[in-house]
Structures are given as structure tokens and as C-alpha cells.
Image: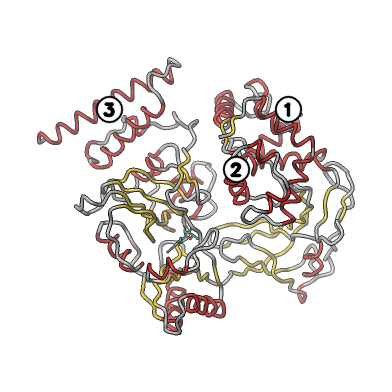
């Protein structure tokens, strides 16, 4: 071994020794010798070295430890520039309109040059390189904040640790793309899971997401995830070409994987040809795609065209047509949502769409049942368009038999026996039980603990439901009154997972204002509105004292949302449970 490798080997040994010592004190002696961040930093350093010099890897390295840190959640990272999503179209008429709009904005009648790409069905990742070295990787998350998956990305063979460029002026660059799993690998993964009696992944996208967002990067390494870049985010010090196509080419030169089906198309005719070709070869690809992405090629033009809230106006996803399956309605049940809305759910004879098994479909509301004229035991067509949940598109009346049964909307809530009412002018039916209805209470608490709200990891539907049944959880503040004794009163919760839950609750005690607002479940206030509210009011006290007129000044808030917010804040019960949360030391950041 040369001197250079001897030195690296020594550094690796030293890091392992140090990390093992810290970890031994932490897990076995309940003592933290260093801050978590110092541990993480050193572990990352070791991971990087092991990634770069695979022959120096070892099974007993702390980077390979399984399960130790299963309690730690992935850190949140704010993206330097928003991670956008895409609007989509599904036919040539919409494509024509898209092109017309672009021509109008650019004030030209000439053919537009587009960069056409595959729309890969995986999950978006943002790779940050500083001076050509991979320093951070994060998922898209909500577009503003994503999860830190650096350790995992470092384990992926397809993501290079350094960019193949020697330009020292290149300080900082964010490379964005899609992480996915090959179809063949996905089937193998599920075969193994089946043999081991483990839960199966419902489709390749879930498998990719589950494999990347792992606390233990070793698992990511064994899943053979793939990556294709599709763009560049923020950069500093780079002289980048002024075309999307050329940018992808330069990424390729730097050793970043890009897909070779990417093509320049001038005008509509060439786009349609590209779309048809890709649709034909779709089956032959070893990864899932759900359409193509059409991007204005000139970066200058992209900047001129601009973006709407979450998506660029200069790009569009042209999705492949919906898949259709014929099946049968077995029964219909009614679920009660967070705001009391009653939703009819049909159980169908299971059908499979692109590897996902579908057993239930929503019938949305009473009007939809009438519109479809659907009955129990009917033969129906179920449609699946892109990422949208499958729905019934048609009843095959010629196949209706004598045992077809009318779907009767309940008059009473099956959970709390309150009356089911309809509100004049609305298509929806509601359980009148309000928060006294167990189903509504459970749904509100599930929402409060969910990922975009307080993000109490491990506190899922089943546990919350049991805690409500045992009257341990009544309001959101009760999450912070839980202790190990209360949690382990629930069947099947072992001491270890109980401890993990208590830790997750502790970690959620510091919360960003928009997460708290979103978690309150105010009707019509989704994540984007919550972020806008935080940006405007800055503090919790400003928010609860907001008046109707100032609410209307906020981006995306109209009269009806402002009314919902005011009504919620005027309800003393709501304010008192928030005060309750603050008294339990919830810290709003
Ligand atoms: S561009 C600036 N290009 O599709 C626009 N996205 O539905 C950002 N995706 O979140 C996206 N293949 O994860 C772009 N060639 C491609 C893509 C692609 C897959 C994903 C991406 C995005 C989602 C939007």
C-alpha cells in the first residue's frame, strides 16, 4: 500500500475509533461525549472517505451500524431556490394552448425551440456541490424545505462524489434530478420482502422514496437506486450555457448521469412525434415514466416567461393517457373526515395499475353517485391518470344484474350517531357531531401530528386512534402530556418504540409557525397559505390577532379563506387549546 493510502487508512481508522467510542458512551452509558452535530459531521467525513475508497470499507464501520439511530429524524434543509413542481396536460389541444401562450409571452409567431425529456416517476433530489464536492443532498419536501439525505446520496453509486471539473471559480451549484429504482430491482426487492414476511412496496416510486429516506444509509446502498439529472438550481461561480439542452450536456461531461432520450424539438409537430415515440418505447424501459416534460430551451426565455406559485410557466408535463381497468363494486362504506365531511368509499375487486394494487376508490359525494348512477355489484371502469388516485369513470350498464343494490346515504353517523346533514348550496354531507365525533377528533389529531404539521414521527393513524379510544388523547396539547406509561398502555407498543415516540414528541416541541398554523386544520388553509401567513405575520401573537382586512392583503387569501381563519380564531375553544400548547412549552420558531 502506497503512503497516500496508508494515510487515508489511518484517518479512516481514527474516525471509526472515535465514533465507536462516542456511540458506546451514548447508547450503553447514557452519556453524550460530544454534540450530535459533531458526531454527524465526523460520521459524514467517514462516509465520504469510504465512498471514495471502497476497498477501505468494512462491515464493522459505524457507517454500517443498523438501527442505532432509528430514533433520529432526517433533518430539514431549506432550499436556496424553490424546488418547483410541474403543471400538466393530457392532450394535443392543451399542448397547442401551452405553445400559443409561450409565443404570446415571447411576442413571436416563430416556432419555439423546446428541450423535451422523459418524465421519470421517482422522487426529486437536490444535490449541492461546493468546489466540485458533494456536500449536501435533500429531497424536494414541500418545495421550500426538504429532508437531509446526504448520507444516503453518498451511498448511491450513480451519484458522483466529485464533479469532473477543475475550474476553481466554481464555488457552489445545486443539481436537481430524479432518484428512481429500476423495475427489475423493484420486483426483486418485493420478492425478497415477501420471503421474509416483510411489508411490500406498492410501486417503484414508493420503493425509491422509502429506500432513499432511510436513517441507515447502508439500506440505501443495498437498494441500487438510480439518478438522472434534469436541471440546475442556484449556482455561484459557474459560467453555465444559456440552453437547457446544453446544460444537461455539460452535466454529463461532469460525470452526472443524464438521460439520453432528451431531445431538442422545434415546434409542435416535433413535440408530438417525440411524445408518440416515447409512448411506444415506454414498455421497453427498465424504469417507470408517466409522460414527457417539455421545457422552453432558452434560459433567457425561461426567465422572461417566469413562474406561478409552485410551477414554472415555461415547462409542462405531457402525461400519458389514463389507464383503465374493468372491475366490480363489492360494497360501499362511509368515512368521516377531519371537518366532518362524509365520503362514500367503494370497495372494489382489486385491480393493478403500474404495479400498484387498488382495492378502494372514492365515490366523493352523493352527487357523484347520482351522476354515475352506480350501484353495489355493478361492473365499472376504473381510471388511473398519473399521480391522481384512481376513480370510477363509468358504469357498464349492459352488465348490471338483478343483484345490483342501491347505495343508501346514512342518516346517522356510524361513529357518534349524530345526524348527517347537508349544507344548502354545498354538494357535501357532514356529520353534525363536530369534535365530539370520535372520527373527526381522530382525523384532526392525525393531521396535527402529520409530516407537514408538527411532524411527530411514528405517531401514525393507528396509534392516535387507540390513544383517542382510551381517552388519553383529547386535544392536540395531550400529545405533549404523553409519557411512557400512558403510551405503553396501548397494546403492541414495546418499551423501545414507546421511548422513540416520546423522543419524537420532544423533537416536535420546537415548531415553525407555518407548521403550527397548518396543523390547526383551519378549513381552506393548506401548507402554502400557512407559509404565506407566517411570512406576513411573523409571530404567533400577530397571527391570532389578525383582522379580516389584513388577512385579505396576503397572497392567495380570498374572502372565504379569511372568513374561515377569523371564525376559527374567534372560537374560544381553539384559542384555549393553543394557549394550552404554549403552556406545555411548545416553542414557536
Ligand atoms: S423539471 C423546474 N424534468 O416531476 C421544473 N421534473 O411533477 C422542475 N420529474 O418534482 C421539474 N422527470 O420530481 C423535471 N425531466 C424532468 C422530470 C421531472 C421527473 C419530476 C420532478 C418534479 C415532478 C413534477
Identify the residue under disc 1.
472
Q: Nearer the viewer, residue 382 or 405?
A: 382
For image coordinates 42% across by 82% down, the residue present is 111
Q: Which residue is mark 2?
A: 514
Distance between mark 2 and mark 3 Cα atoms: 39 Å
Seen from this angle, which residue lies furthest left? 2
Q: Earlier in the sequence, mark 1 or mark 3?
A: 3
Name the N-terminal-most of marks 2 and 3: 3
Q: Are marks 2 and 3 in contact (CB under 8 Å)?
A: no
> Nearer the viewer's eye, disc 2 or disc 3?
2
Give the Cα distance between marks 1 and 2.
27 Å
Q: Is residue 408 above or below residue 320?
A: above
Q: Quadrant of the N terminus?
A: top left
What numbered label is drawn on residue 15?
Answer: 3
> Disc 1 on helix, strand or loop?
loop
Q: Nearer the viewer, mark 1 or mark 2?
A: 2
| Residue 41 point in image, percent of width and height | 34, 32
| Near-viewer residue (154 or 315) | 315
Residue farthest along the front direction in this orientation: 549
Residue 258's x, y, as percent? 33, 62
Indicate yes or no: mark 1 CB to ligand 1 under 8 Å.
no
Residue 31's x, y, as percent? 43, 16
Asked which colour scheme the image uses, the reply is: secondary structure
Between disc 1 and disc 2, whose residue precedes?
1
Amino acid at each position: 500500500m502506497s503512503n497516500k493510502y496508508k494515510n487515508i487508512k489511518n484517518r479512516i481508522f481514527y474516525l471509526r475509533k472515535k465514533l465507536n467510542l462516542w456511540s458506546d458512551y451514548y447508547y450503553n452509558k447514557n452519556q453524550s461525549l460530544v454534540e450530535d452535530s459533531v458526531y454527524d459531521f465526523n460520521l459524514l467525513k467517514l462516509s465520504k472517505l469510504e465512498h471514495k475508497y471502497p476497498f477501505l470499507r468494512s462491515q464493522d464501520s459505524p457507517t454500517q451500524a443498523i438501527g442505532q439511530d432509528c430514533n433520529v429524524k432526517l433533518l430539514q434543509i431549506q432550499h436556496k431556490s424553490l424546488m418547483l413542481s410541474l403543471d400538466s396536460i393530457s392532450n394535443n389541444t392543451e399542448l397547442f394552448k401551452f405553445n400559443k401562450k409561450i409565443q404570446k409571452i415571447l411576442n413571436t409567431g416563430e416556432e419555439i425551440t423546446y428541450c423535451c425529456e422523459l418524465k421519470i416517476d421517482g422522487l426529486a433530489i437536490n444535490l449541492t456541490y461546493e468546489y466540485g464536492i458533494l456536500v449536501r443532498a435533500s429531497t424536494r419536501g414541500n418545495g421550500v424545505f426538504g429532508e437531509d439525505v446526504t448520507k444516503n446520496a453518498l451511498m448511491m453509486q450513480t451519484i458522483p462524489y466529485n464533479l469532473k471539473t477543475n475550474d476553481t471559480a466554481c464555488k457552489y451549484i445545486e443539481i436537481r434530478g430524479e432518484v428512481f429504482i429500476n423495475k427489475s430491482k423493484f420486483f426483486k426487492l418485493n420478492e425478497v420482502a415477501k420471503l421474509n414476511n416483510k411489508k411490500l412496496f406498492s410501486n417503484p416510486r414508493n420503493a425509491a422514496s422509502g429506500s432513499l429516506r432511510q436513517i441507515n444509509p447502508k439500506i440505501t446502498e443495498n437498494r441500487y437506486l438510480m439518478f438522472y439529472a434534469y436541471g440546475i438550481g442556484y449556482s455561484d461561480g459557474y459560467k453555465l450555457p444559456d440552453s437547457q439542452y446544453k446544460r444537461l450536456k455539460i452535466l454529463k461531461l461532469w460525470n452526472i448521469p443524464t438521460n439520453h432520450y432528451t431531445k431538442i424539438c422545434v415546434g409542435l409537430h416535433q413535440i408530438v412525434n417525440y411524445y408518440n415515440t416515447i409512448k411506444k418505447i415506454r414498455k421497453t424501459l427498465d424504469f417507470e415514466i408517466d409522460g414527457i416534460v417539455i421545457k422552453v430551451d432558452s434560459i433567457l426565455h425561461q426567465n422572461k416567461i417566469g413562474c406561478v406559485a409552485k410551477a414554472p410557466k415555461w415547462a409542462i408535463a405531457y402525461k400519458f393517457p389514463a389507464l383503465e381497468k374493468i372491475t366490480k363494486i363489492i360494497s360501499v362504506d362511509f368515512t368521516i373526515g377531519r371537518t366532518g365531511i362524509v365520503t362514500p368509499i367503494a370497495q372494489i375487486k382489486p385491480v393493478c395499475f403500474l404495479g400498484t394494487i387498488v382495492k378502494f376508490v372514492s365515490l366523493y359525494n352523493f352527487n357523484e353517485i347520482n351522476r354515475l348512477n352506480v350501484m353495489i355489484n355493478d361492473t365499472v371502469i376504473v381510471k388511473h391518470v398519473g399521480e391522481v388516485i384512481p376513480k370510477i369513470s363509468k358504469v357498464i350498464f349492459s352488465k348490471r344484474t338483478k343483484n345490483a343494490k342501491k347505495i343508501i346515504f346514512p342518516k346517522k353517523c356510524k361513529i357518534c350517531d349524530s345526524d348527517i346533514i347537508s349544507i344548502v348550496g354545498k354538494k357535501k354531507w357532514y356529520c353534525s357531531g363536530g369534535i365530539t365525533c370520535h372520527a373527526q377528533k381522530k382525523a384532526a389529531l392525525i393531521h396535527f401530528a402529520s409530516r407537514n404539521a408538527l411532524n411527530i414521527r411514528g405517531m401514525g393513524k393507528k396509534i392516535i386512534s387507540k390513544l383517542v379510544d382510551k381517552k388519553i388523547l383529547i386535544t392536540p396539547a395531550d400529545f405533549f402530556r404523553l409519557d411512557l406509561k400512558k403510551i405503553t398502555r396501548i397494546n403492541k407498543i414495546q418499551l423501545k418504540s414507546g421511548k422513540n415516540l416520546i423522543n419524537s414528541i420532544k423533537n416536535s416541541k420546537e415548531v415553525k409557525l407555518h407548521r403550527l398554523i397548518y396543523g390547526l386544520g383551519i378549513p381552506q388553509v393548506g401548507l402554502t397559505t400557512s407559509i404565506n401567513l407566517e411570512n406576513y405575520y411573523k409571530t404567533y401573537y400577530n397571527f391570532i390577532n389578525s383582522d379580516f382586512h389584513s388577512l385579505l392583503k396576503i397572497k392567495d387569501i380570498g374572502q372565504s379563506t379569511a372568513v374561515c381563519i377569523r371564525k376559527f380564531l374567534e372560537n374560544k375553544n381553539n384559542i384555549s387549546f393553543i394557549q394550552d400548547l404554549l403552556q406545555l412549552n411548545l416553542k414557536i420558531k
